[in-house]
């Protein structure tokens, strides 16, 4: 192991308390949870200091949660800034999920023409209008890859100072110090640059559950996301690739952000790859309430029978699949490409268990395509079970295995070999590839807030389907989407679930950008990158869910596979008639 960076940072709240003089009155914005900020205010009060310490993260939301009395409010108008260096709806997105937390009050979001970092809020109460100006401290800055960002920042404003000034917080110093150290390290010129790059952070912020869906405000989760994707971007630039290139193979980047008792520290080091799993107990798979053990998945797959075939991951873990040969039109079924999207893994194996009972079943099943990522997800869930853990999204090589081809993989074909084998064995023209996406808001607060290259997925919007097809397969693609969405609409509660999430998404995003087919958001596009002519991709909002929510998720995934399989048989029968 090689240590690259290590430091402790004094907590900004402690600095504010220790440095303040009696009689002072001030406001500050920091990256801290509510309990910690209130405790600091009390400590200042005991010193004879009047202070209000607000959240630098999502300040509009926290102002409503902590300071605004909504009793009697019937209408709310939020006029938000639009900045040239940020997406037009950036500050509207940042208010999420405010619209679901204001009771029966009607809420409207209206863009302002200026770039000032504040919200103008008008509250209508008992026929009277109250106006508020809510500061949203941000700074315009260039990041490690040369992109210009508008990012939340700390702020300090003493009594009598209209504007105030930037306060560089512990949260920001920790992040930028580590990024600079990693960027300044000598990584060589050949991918992968390391086995595991571990960023271990202790930070005291508590997560805050919100009373809507699976929503939670988590400074520690946001830090994980910002570290992971900022470092991917750094290595993309270092390698000469464009930002967002999913073929980059830097190695496994692992931010581990754990809750401390008050201290703030970080250690960055390279480590060897792990090779095992942190398996829990077996579950009845049809009613599994959390991601299953890898060993149980292997046992369930073995019960499918048929012809077994395998590939090997970078760490040496086995990728297993089975081919069930029959007279039906063949279908490829896969899950776990992104193994933090866990309902896909359960849904895939459940669907295979149903299909194998068909007299003429013909399919391949590879339910856990990225075991290295799955093992990392197990590890990260120990400290933070309800976080998204996008570090577990890609392989131990650091790439998205879908973008690995025989031409660009060199000696690292590894997990991707399972798909090539599946297609060669069965000759399928349809691939049902199960995925998921965040079940609560996804942000990168220190790099422009909205996740770069993933803006569409920053808010949940129901069970989403993506169809990618070859140029002359549009008719089949549309027929498949129609059939599958009609079937999914018969699942009790699923359409209502979609409606709730889409309605909240539209309020805060301001637009959808996708089609609604039979009540389900869909995207369909020509994509000749896939060797299979039709690829149906599911996107269930499943990252972080458990219990009954998890069961509903993997049931929807399973039903999608079965419906697509049956639609394919009908389409092939019609084509040959």
Image (cartoon, rainbow, N blue to C red):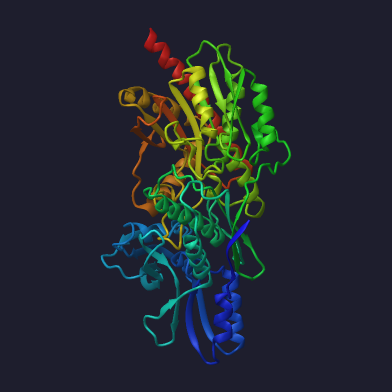
Residue 122 in view, yes or no:
no
Residue 48 in view, yes or no:
yes
Q: Is residue 79 above or below residue 167?
A: above
Q: Is residue 414 above or below residue 564?
A: below
Q: Which residue, as the protein is rendered here, is positioned at the far top? A: 577
Nearer-the-camera pick, 305 or 349 = 305
Residue 63's spot in the image, x, y percent?
47, 69
Residue 446's spot in the image, x, y percent?
45, 63
Q: Which residue, as the protein is rendered here, is positioned at the far right? A: 281
For the C terminus, the quadrant is: top left
Name the residue: 70% across, 41% down. 279
Name the residue: 51% across, 51% down. 440
Name the residue: 37% across, 73% down. 133
Q: Is residue 174 above or below residue 392?
A: below
Count of number-bearing discs: 0
Q: Quadrant of residue 260?
A: bottom right
For the N terminus, the quadrant is: bottom right
Residue 356's spot in the image, x, y percent?
60, 18
Residue 458's spot in the image, x, y percent?
44, 51
Nearer-the-camera pick, 1 or 324 = 1
Taking 107 as reference, is 267 left or right? right
């Amino acid at each position: 192991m090689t240590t690259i960076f290590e430091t402790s940072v004094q907590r900004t709240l402690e600095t504010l308390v220790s440095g303040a003089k009696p009689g002072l009155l001030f406001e500050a914005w920091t990256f801290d949870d509510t309990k910690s900020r209130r405790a600091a205010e009390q400590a200042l009060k005991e010193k004879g200091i009047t202070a209000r310490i607000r959240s630098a993260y999502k300040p509009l939301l926290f102002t409503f949660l902590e300071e605004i009395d909504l009793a009697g409010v019937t209408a709310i108008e939020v006029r938000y800034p639009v900045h040239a260096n940020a997406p037009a709806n950036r500050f509207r997105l940042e208010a999420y999920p405010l619209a679901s937390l204001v009771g029966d009050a009607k809420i409207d979001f209206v863009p302002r023409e200026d770039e000032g970092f504040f919200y103008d809020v008008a509250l209508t109460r008992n026929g009277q209008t109250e106006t508020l100006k809510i500061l949203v401290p941000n700074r315009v800055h260039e990041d490690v890859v040369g992109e210009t960002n508008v990012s939340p920042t700390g702020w300090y404003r003493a009594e009598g100072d209209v504007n105030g000034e930037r306060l560089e917080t512990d949260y920001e110093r920790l992040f930028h110090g580590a990024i600079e150290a990693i960027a300044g390290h000598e990584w060589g010129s050949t991918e992968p640059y390391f086995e595991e790059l571990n960023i271990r952070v202790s930070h005291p912020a508590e997560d805050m559950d919100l009373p809507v869906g699976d929503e939670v405000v988590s400074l520690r989760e946001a830090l994980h996301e910002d570290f992971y994707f900022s470092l991917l971007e750094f290595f993309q630039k270092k390698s000469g690739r464009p930002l967002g290139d999913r073929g980059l193979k830097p190695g496994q980047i692992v931010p581990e952000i754990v809750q401390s008792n008050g201290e703030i520290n970080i250690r960055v080091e390279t480590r060897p790859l792990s090779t095992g799993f942190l398996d829990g107990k077996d579950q009845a798979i049809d009613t599994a309430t959390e991601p299953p053990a890898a060993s149980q998945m292997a046992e369930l797959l073995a019960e499918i029978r048929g012809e077994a075939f395998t590939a090997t991951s970078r760490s040496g873990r086995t990728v297993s699949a089975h081919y069930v040969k029959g007279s039906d039109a063949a279908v490829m079924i896969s899950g776990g490409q992104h193994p933090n999207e866990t309902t896909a893994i359960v849904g895939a194996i459940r669907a295979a268990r149903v299909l194998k009972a068909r007299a003429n079943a013909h399919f391949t099943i590879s339910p856990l395509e990225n075991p290295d990522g799955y093992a990392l997800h197990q590890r990260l869930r120990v400290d933070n079970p309800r976080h998204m853990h996008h570090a577990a999204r890609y392989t131990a090589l650091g790439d998205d295995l879908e973008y690995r081809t025989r031409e660009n993989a060199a000696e690292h074909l590894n997990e991707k070999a399972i798909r090539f084998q599946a297609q060669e064995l069965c000759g399928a023209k349809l691939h049902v590839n199960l995925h998921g996406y965040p079940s609560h808001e996804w942000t990168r607060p220190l790099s422009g807030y909205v996740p770069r290259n993933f803006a569409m997925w920053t808010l949940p919007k129901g069970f989403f389907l993506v169809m990618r097809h070859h140029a002359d397969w549009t008719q089949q693609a549309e027929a498949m989407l129609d059939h599958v969405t009609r079937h999914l609409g018969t699942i009790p509660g699923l359409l209502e679930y979609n409606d709730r999430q889409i309605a909240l998404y539209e309020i805060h995003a301001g637009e959808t950008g996708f089609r609604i087919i039979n009540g389900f958001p869909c995207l369909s596009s020509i994509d000749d990158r896939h060797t299979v002519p039709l690829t149906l991709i599911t996107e269930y909002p499943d990252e972080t869910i458990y219990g009954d929510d998890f069961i509903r998720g993997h049931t929807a995934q399973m039903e999608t596979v079965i419906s697509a399989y049956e639609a394919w048989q009908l389409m092939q029968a019609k084509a040959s008639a």
